[in-house]
Amino acid sequence: MHFAVYTRKVGMSSRLYHLETQLIQNVHAPDPVSGTAASSLDQNTAYAYESAEALEDVFAGRAPGYVYSRIGNPTVASFERRMADMEDGLGAVACASGMAAISMAVMALAGAGDEIVAANSLFGGTWTLFSQTLCRYGITTRFVDSTDPEAYRQAVTDRTRLIFVESIGNPKLDVPDLAAIAVVAREAGVALVVDNTVATPVLLQPKSLGADLVIHSASKFINGHGNAIGGVIIDSGIFDWSASRYSHLHDWHKRAGDQALLAFLRNTIRRDLG
């Protein structure tokens, strides 16, 4: 078991610098040998260890390290660390795309017979995932008026496993009341997942308004160059993953504490589904 080793204490040093300075000064330590000031591109698939015992400790989750690049590598870890810092989160798990991030978050929280409450103003790919694809796997989505907090409250049932909303709707540019929706989610004991792609952490940190998970399609403003696809899930660190609605995470919570969802995403969802 490989725990998410790229986590941080919630709130630690997140505002020692202005965001612009933080992005270039507070993430990557220079290489002690070469002095390289930027993150290197790690193209390894597997990693060597000094002994079989050391390898066993990493594989068992007793020691930090890298197992296989599908699960994590130093380059991806640098990106995850930077995104967690920008969103003032506990930690992050990077994905192949924004849609992969949304899919992973849903699969980590919901299963057959469960429900999602989602804003009705969503990116087209997210809409079809929720309305056409997930239903084939037994997950039902209840769409509500994105700007009506009471509609979310009325749509939540005992089967609801997450509330999903975009901080700024794409393409309508509607702006939901995240703080009010977070109150609904908290009252129901349901995780609030916010896609913050359009706003970016520069304009908004959804955690400050009560979001439990923050998602980005890094292909947009995070990348900024239109030359790479990526996605990321950030755990804000404020949700108790031992909550009754998430019984499948209880063993992970016993082993990994507040990192339970990050560990499950990395060691189960990303490991098994790539």
Image: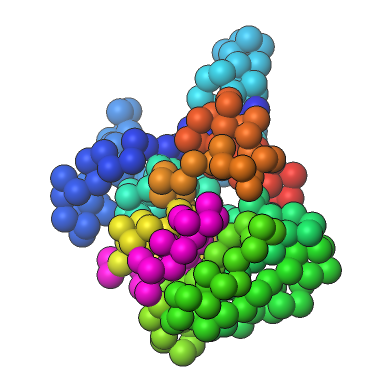
Residue closest to the eye, 240 or 214: 240
Q: Residue at x 69, y 64 (%)?
A: 115
Q: Which residues are magenta?
A: 177-203
Residue 164 seen by the camera: yes
- Which residue is the extreme one toward the bottom? 172
Residue closest to the eye, 171 or 111: 111
Residue 228 seen by the camera: no
**In the displayed structure image, the side of residue 18 where residue 142 appears, left or right:** right
**In the displayed structure image, the side of residue 184 where residue 112 appears, left or right:** right
Q: Residue at x 69, y 59 (%)?
A: 159
Residue closest to the eye, 70 or 202: 202
Q: Residue at x 58, y 60 (%)?
A: 162
Residue closest to the eye, 182 or 61: 182
Q: Position of residue 13 (x, y in %)?
A: 22, 41
Does 93 sit above or below residue 114? above
Name the image quarter holding residue 179: bottom left
- Is residue 70 magenta-colored? no
Q: Residue at x 33, y 41 (%)?
A: 10
Does 25 sit above or below residue 258? below
Q: Specify how the rendered protein is coloured.
A: rainbow
Q: Position of residue 184 (x, y in %)?
A: 46, 63
Does 195 sit above or below residue 10? below
**In the displayed structure image, the side of residue 201 where residue 234 appears, left or right:** right
- Is residue 200 magenta-colored? yes
Q: Position of residue 29 (x, y in %)?
A: 29, 37
Q: Position of residue 60 (x, y in %)?
A: 64, 21
Task: Tell me how many marks there are.
Answer: 0
Name the image quarter holding residue 67: top right
Q: Quadrant of the N terminus?
A: top right
